Amino acid sequence: MRPQRLKETHDLNELIFKYEVMSQKGTVFFIEKTGFLELIHHYEKEGSTDKALDVVDHALSLHEFVAELHISKARLLLSINCPEDAIECLEQSRALGSKNLVTELLYARALTLLDELEEALNILDQCKVTLCNNEKELSDILLLEACIFEKQKMYERAFYTLQESILKNTRNQKALERIWFNVECNRRHEKSLNFHKEIIEIDPYSSWAWFNLGHAYYFQHDYQKAIEAFEYAFLIDENFDFAYRDCAEVCMTIQDYNKALQCYLELTEHRVADPDILQKIGECYLVLCEYSKAKIYLLRAVNIDPQNDEALFFVGQCFANEGQIGSAVHFYKKAIELEDQREDYLSALANAYYKLGIYRKIPMLFNKVIELAPHESQYWYQYACFLIKRGKINEAIFLLNSAEKEASGTELLFCKAAALFLTHQNLDEAYSLLEEALLDNYKMYPILFELAPHLTRHRKLQAMIIYFRDEQ
């Protein structure tokens, strides 16, 4: 940091300290208007709008005729959706002779919030003629104009106005953010793709243009190009939170968990990790079978947010994969206490109970799972396997007959064929189901022998499997 910058930082910190001490004492004290403006900017940047408003009110009690303070208050009031009070401040500013582009854009924003859209558009038209001095200023006018068109549900006109705004100033971040929102809501991804390519030709270092391009590629399922575009976005701006997150999400979509993990870890180098980031890192480590690291991040997420049921569930998955089933059950139960309508949580607990030999609770859990997700064949299959392994073959067949009305899956065909073979009844149906299953997915045939090991010695059945193997 340069010496001058150090001095400026020191002076601002001293000013903040002085103001906060005096405020706590309730003491009235005098600061030059520039000092007040610095304080307002500081609190505004921090997101402390209430403190910023307190500062501006104190400043106005001492500097009633300073137009910049009225403008600052109007801006703050608009940020908390108080347009009528903001207009009152802007009228005071105008009365003090400060009618410029900043005040008129704020005035138009206030009118927009009050749904006085035609009047707001009239002000913007006047701004273009009398107050606009360069393309950057015109870009800001067009941005607000586009927001008004969106309010009027003229989404296409808003889109093209945003394009015009960005072409006037390729670094207008608010316009680039707004066009992303417009594209996402109105599915203009193809137009967005071409437009942002054009912007990148003009300005290759526009991080938001790369970010928007990434979303356009993602919508077209061109995941590798989407990842590359998001990477350019955060390489240009290392603090671009959304770019890291969205790049990681695309990587997870294509199951490239190593790359997703890299994105999340890079993000934590530039900002404090929130529970969501910590959970995602843990999830990546879980899929990559690095269970100890996964638990560290997942438990950190839970420490910050004890209501994070997903993180608790993933901790349970880590323990289950390590063979520590008792610990897995503990965390599954904690997740279910917070969210008892997740079929994956309940089925994981049921399977853990099976491994522990605690059978009596399993039917109740699987019945709830099937109620929650009747069209998911995997849960019918898991329940049927449990019944078969417990020797309740007829119950399993009854369950699989019920499953036919709700779900379909090759595993269910193999499972029912195995159950029928075990009963030594309806063998014609058993062979018919087996043939259908082998035609559908030959590679799943080991299910049959897992459920009915004695069938490995059945010559006719073995010949049938060999026949379908040769037909592959």
Image (tube, grey):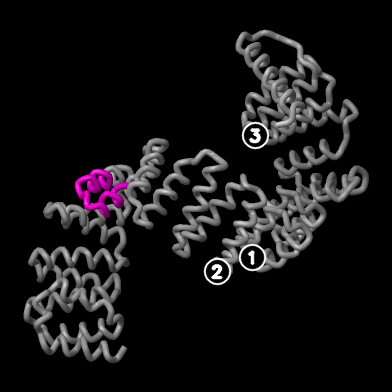
Per the image, label 2 sits on a secondary structure element best described as loop
Question: How far is mark 3 from mark 2, CA to CA?
Answer: 38 Å
The disc placed on residue 80 is: 3
Q: Residues within 10 Å of mark 3 (few under 14, many from 20)?
A: few
Question: How far is mark 3 from mark 1, CA to CA?
Answer: 32 Å
Residue highlighted by disc 2: 221
**Quadrant of the image for the C terminus?**
bottom left
Is residue 331 covered in magenta? Answer: yes
Per the image, label 3 sits on a secondary structure element best described as loop
Residue 54 visible in image: yes
Which label lies toward us, 1 or 2? 2
Which range is magenta?
A: 315-333
Q: Amino acid at mark 3?
A: Ile
Residue highlighted by disc 1: 189
Percent coordinates x, y for residue 362 in the rendering: 17, 55
What's the residue at 28%, 66% (across, down)?
A: 378
Of residue 430 and residue 247, the one placed in the foreground of this image is 247
Residue 356 versus residue 399 in the image, above or below: above
Q: Amino acid at mark 2?
A: His
Percent coordinates x, y for residue 463 in the rendering: 17, 90
